[in-house]
Image (cartoon, rainbow, N blue to C red):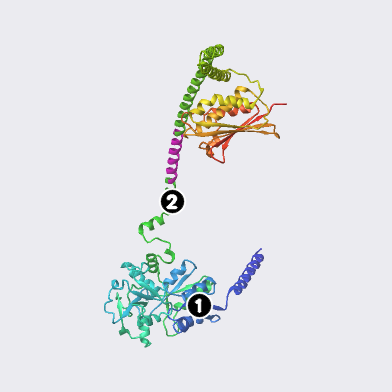
Amino acid sequence: MLSRYLSALSLYCLLAIIGLSAVASPIIHLGVLDWRDESKATTSRWAATLAAIEQQQPSKKIVLHQLSLEGIAAALAEERLDYLITNPGHYVQLSQTYPLAPLATLSNPFFDLPQQAIGSVVLVPATRIEINRWEDLRSLTLGAVTQDAFGGFQLIWDELEQRGLNPERASVQLKLTGFPMVQLFDSLAKGEVDAIVVRSCLAEVLAAEGRINLADYRVVGEQKHPNYPCLTSSQLYPDWPFLSTGKQTAAEVSQVLQALLQPVGNQPAQWLAPLSYQPVYALFERLRLGPFASFPHNPLLTAVYQYRYPLLLVFGLLLLIFTHHIRVGYLVGKRSQELQQAMQESQQKQKELAHLSRFAVMGELAAGLAHELNQPLTAILNYAQGSQRLLQQINGENNPQKEPLIAAAQKIVAQGERAAEIIRNLRAFMRKGNSDQQQLDPKQLLQEVRLLMDASLQAQKVALNVYLPEKLPLIRANRVEFLQILINLVSNALDAMQHQTAGRIDIFVEQDRQRNLLVFELIDKGEGLSTEVEQRIFEPFFTTRPEGMGLGLSLSRTLAIAQGASLNLVPHSAGGACACLEWPLANE
């Protein structure tokens, strides 16, 4: 049993050694931010660091990559770097995307406090004596390399923001030149900008190299820091970090860390234990950069953003309650409106039924009146006819008024016969009929309709024109119901033209031999039909007139269908409406 465990442990160790040998690389790729000039950079500044790592890991080859801000981001994205040296702001900016871990902080031998090593300075020509304070920069042009430069812009940006001078709101005009940073001095000398932002100590380095004269420049918003030998206009922040990109094993990282913290020869260690970069995070939080880019600037908005999920929940509940309240109010109002409308419709139906009842009573009175008038009309006709015969027996020579009297008697007889015919038709129309159908002459039925509607037509000055074919077949219908349908159609046409001073109603009669029908088309010149009215015109109690009952057309269609006919009402192309009544012909 023990031998099996030892064999398994040996195999595991062997596989681990093989895996490590396969993963480990003989080359260490170290990226460095070159903030002066990438094309002219040398390894002299980082010679001690390279020597320390090579001394600790002699089997490794150190490759130094001097990159710009964009170059470092691209190299990290492609996982080409094992370690990285950059400024604190760039580290914080990259930390939201890449798993960078600070192993050490650069030790500057000139500063007593290592956490106060990086600053920025604003320089103007010494001749611009009118520019002394931060407020003097308002509306002037400020030169910088890029907005992503920590010591080259972001530290001064923080100072400007604290004094209400926001470059993003054009309080100070910003001109970005890009790297290298030394070209800002040329832009200032040419008058392209009024002031420049550079990293602290750069001016001193260039002066030591003989490239500029410090006496030609003045500092805006100068700040004094104990034991800090360089000109500065900003607060000071920890120096550059040495970062691990997370690609190395723990053993390799430990060896590199030991190399960084140990002196090389007679030289002290170039690196210290990693400092806290919390001040840099606080700076980025004030400027809303890097990890804080999505945070609002307003404190109230910051609190809202911080508690956004509980606030959204509360807002959602309030919105749900408000929506429910609105919905309940809407449903109650809608139901109340429906009840009120139903009550109004019920009252209207009661009025219509009362009106219909009065019409029924008037129908009975009309029938009785027609019966009572028939006797005096018969007597008038008899007296007129008797008078006519007596006048014809009188000698005309002795009575010159004979001929006019005979003519008057003839007119009395004619008008009496006409009145009697009207009363007979009225009595026939009002008589309780049965559902028996007869073979009827359409021409005679149309004449009866004209006779019954003559008074209404003359009152509205409407002409009724009937167009018949030469040969008109008989139809099979109930006489009273057919007359009722046509009279309702003529009455409906008159109502449609009630606001016109004069008009006409045309009735066209044609035979449809294929369908064995006789087609009656009644066309008026009224207001026509809208789409809504056309769809509801045959509904019971639907009417477009305040005094209408809405029963005439509905009853007419019901009577027509009961006798095998059809009735439709559509808008006419020339205006008005067309009522189409299709009636079956009588069997031969």
What is the number of the mark on residue 529? none
In magenta, the rendered stretch is 319-336
Indicate the quadrant containing the N terminus: top left, top right, bottom left or bottom right.
bottom right
Asked if one can make out residue 42 in the rendered structure from this viewpoint, the answer is no
User: Dot 2 lies on which element?
Assistant: helix
* Magenta stretch holds residue 244: no
**Where's residue 456, x and y in %?**
50, 27
Which class describes the residues within 10 Å of circle 1: few (<14), some (14-19), or many (20+)?
A: many
Confirm or deny contact between disc 2 and disc 1 (CB under 8 A). Answer: no
Q: Which residue is mark 2?
A: 312
Say what amino acid the circle numbered 1 marks: Leu
Q: Which residue is mark 1?
A: 30
Q: Earlier in the sequence, mark 2 or mark 1?
A: 1
Q: Up-down: is 249 above or below 423? A: below
Left or right position of 131 against 561: left
Judging depth in this view, the residue of 262 and 68 nearest the camera is 68
Judging depth in this view, the residue of 159 and 533 nearest the camera is 533
Say what amino acid the circle numbered 2 marks: Leu
Which class describes the residues within 10 Å of circle 2: few (<14), some (14-19), or many (20+)?
A: few
Q: Residue furthest bottom?
A: 210
| Chief SS of the magenta region | helix
**Where's residue 163, x and y in %?**
30, 68
